[in-house]
């Protein structure tokens, strides 16, 4: 019979496509890895990997099995996290993903309240972009993730958290050239500084501002909203800022925040999770805790 060890070894090799790297990741010897993979192939009666001097690739059967193995290991991770939790709601380990335009503003408020209301809860936080967090959900590496809609993946369920309204952040020195609230149609003519590719707020900003021409936006980018807002303070352009970030990001000075006229742009933050999770009660309770903090 196949073993959990073989499934985990298979997953490591299917992700790295390198026996040496997979063995190091698993903290085992390369011959031990090769033996377990060979036993798995023998049991299934098919080759899972094509081995060549140039490297390792998944066969057609290996590709098919890889998806099944990810789902199996994700379900096992769910069971393990349930054991960590014990009998109480929001106790034990909860692995939470967050996008970078939420984590630094939510965590300082969320974690103290969580510790007070649920002292047995152990939150493990992972910050990343939406696509990576969705992949981590599928793989069972995290239990839930705070992201912004849309999520084009029918295998992921969501519960709403809050509507996060956007405002326009401008250099304080340029406040005289704007009227408030800012007409949405004027955003397309602004020199926008955006987050780098991969961040959902970048695509949201492009859609909101109807910016499609490279000449309409600054050829600048950053991996954090804080860096972008320091560029704005320096007079390099303007950007959109979500409500969740305003209090923290305006303390350093140098920027003015202007409301945008109707239709007011916003993003919808949700808590995403696998619909097959056996921690539905924890997910629901955690979502309610986040709503309390964000209200």
Image (spheres, grey):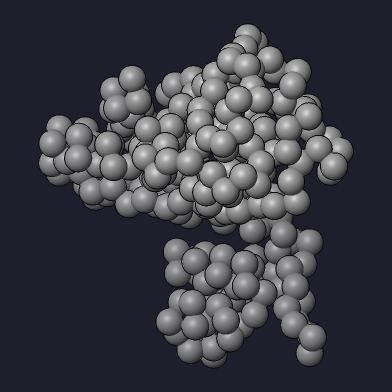
Q: Position of residue 64 (x, y in %)?
A: 71, 55
Q: Position of residue 83 (x, y in %)?
A: 25, 48
Left or right of 61 in this view: 8: left
Residue pictured at 63% horizontal, 9% vertical = 262
Observer-nearest of 148 and 195: 195
Q: Is residue 90 visible?
A: yes
Residue farthest toward the top in the current orientation of the protein: 262
Observer-nearest of 174 and 9: 174
Observer-nearest of 22 and 34: 22
Q: Is residue 288 visible?
A: no
Residue pictured at 56% horizontal, 36% vertical = 173
Residue pictured at 58% horizontal, 43% vertical = 232
Q: Position of residue 110 (x, y in %)?
A: 28, 37
Q: Position of residue 123 (x, y in %)?
A: 28, 47
Q: Determine which quarter of the picture holds residue 283.
A: top left
Left or right of 215 in this view: 117: left
């Amino acid at each position: 019979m196949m073993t959990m060890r073989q499934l985990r070894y298979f997953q490591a090799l299917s992700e790295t496509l390198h026996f040496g790297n997979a063995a190091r990741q698993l903290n085992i010897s390369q011959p031990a890895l090769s033996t377990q993979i060979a036993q798995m192939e023998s049991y299934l009666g098919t080759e899972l990997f094509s081995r060549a001097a140039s490297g390792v690739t998944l066969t057609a059967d290996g590709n098919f099995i890889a998806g099944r193995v990810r789902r199996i290991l994700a379900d096992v991770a769910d069971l393990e996290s349930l054991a960590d939790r014990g009998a109480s709601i929001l106790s034990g380990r909860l692995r939470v993903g967050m996008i970078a335009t939420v984590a630094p503003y939510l965590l300082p408020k969320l974690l103290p309240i969580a510790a007070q209301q649920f002292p047995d809860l152990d939150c493990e936080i992972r910050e990343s972009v939406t696509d990576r967090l969705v992949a981590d959900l599928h793989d069972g590496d995290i239990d839930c993730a705070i992201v912004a809609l849309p999520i084009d993946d029918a295998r992921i369920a969501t519960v709403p958290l809050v509507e996060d309204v956007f405002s326009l952040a401008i250099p304080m020195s340029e406040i005289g050239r704007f009227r408030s609230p800012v007409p949405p149609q004027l955003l397309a003519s602004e020199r926008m500084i955006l987050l780098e590719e991969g961040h959902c707020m970048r695509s949201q900003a492009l859609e909101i501002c109807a910016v499609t021409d490279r000449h309409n936006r600054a050829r600048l980018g950053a991996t954090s909203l804080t860096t972008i807002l320091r560029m704005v303070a320096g007079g390099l352009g303007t950007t959109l800022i979500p409500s969740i970030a305003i209090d923290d990001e305006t303390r350093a000075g140098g920027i003015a925040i202007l409301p945008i006229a109707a239709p007011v742009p916003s993003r919808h933050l949700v808590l995403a999770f696998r619909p097959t999770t056996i921690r539905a009660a924890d997910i629901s309770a955690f979502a309610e805790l986040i709503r309390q903090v964000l209200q």
